[in-house]
Amino acid sequence: KDLTVSLHHEICDFVEFIQPVRAETKKRDELVRHLRCITNELWPEARLEVFGSCVTGLQLPCSDVDMVVLEFTCDRAKALNSFASVIKADGGFTKIQVIAKAKVPIIKFED
């Protein structure tokens, strides 16, 4: 029984450890809001959605944020390059990398 109680406490401690602190959550929310504004400026009909661990609550501290742009009618490669150009000019992002030839084309960057 002591082993079970000990394991329970370790699991509770781990769950508490991986919970995002308020500052992390605020920073992620601001990032998503900013990128939604950029998306809407480029493609008014489009919408940017978050998916993955941030939505499910399973993210770890310093996890990436997975996002997708939906409902836009531009050529995909052109859209990736346009978005990358805008976030580069924004100045708040680094290590911007367009991977247009991937099965699912993406842009990687850091804020």
Image (tube, grey):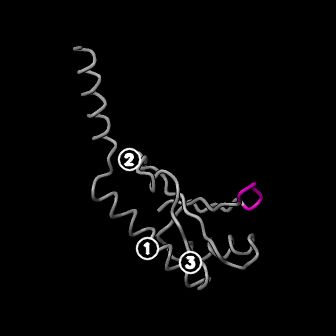
Q: Residue at label 2?
A: 61
- Using the rendered view, name the quadrant where residue 43 is placed: bottom right
Q: Mark 2 belongs to which amino acid?
A: Pro
Look at the numbered discs 2 and 3 and tell me whether their residues touch, using CB distance below 8 Å: no
- From the top left corner, tell me how far across and down residue 61 is, in percent: 38, 47
Residue at the (72%, 79%) spot, across then down = 73
Q: CA–CA distance between discs 2 and 3?
A: 26 Å
- From the top left corner, tell me how far across and down residue 35 is, in percent: 50, 73
Q: Mark 1 belongs to which amino acid?
A: Arg
Q: Secondary structure at mark 1?
A: helix
Closer to the chain start, of discs 2 and 3, is: 3
Stretch in magenta:
100-104
Query: Considering depth in this image, is 98 or 103 the residue closer to the camera?
Result: 103
Q: Residue at label 3?
A: 39
Q: Secondary structure at mark 2?
A: loop
Residue at the (28%, 27%) spot, across then down = 10
Closer to the chain start, of discs 3 and 1, is: 1
Q: Residue at label 1?
A: 33
Q: CA–CA distance between discs 3 and 1?
A: 10 Å
- From the top left corner, tell me how far across and down residue 54 is, in percent: 44, 55
How busy is the neighbourhood of tag 1: few (under 14 within 10 Å), some, or many (20 plus)? few
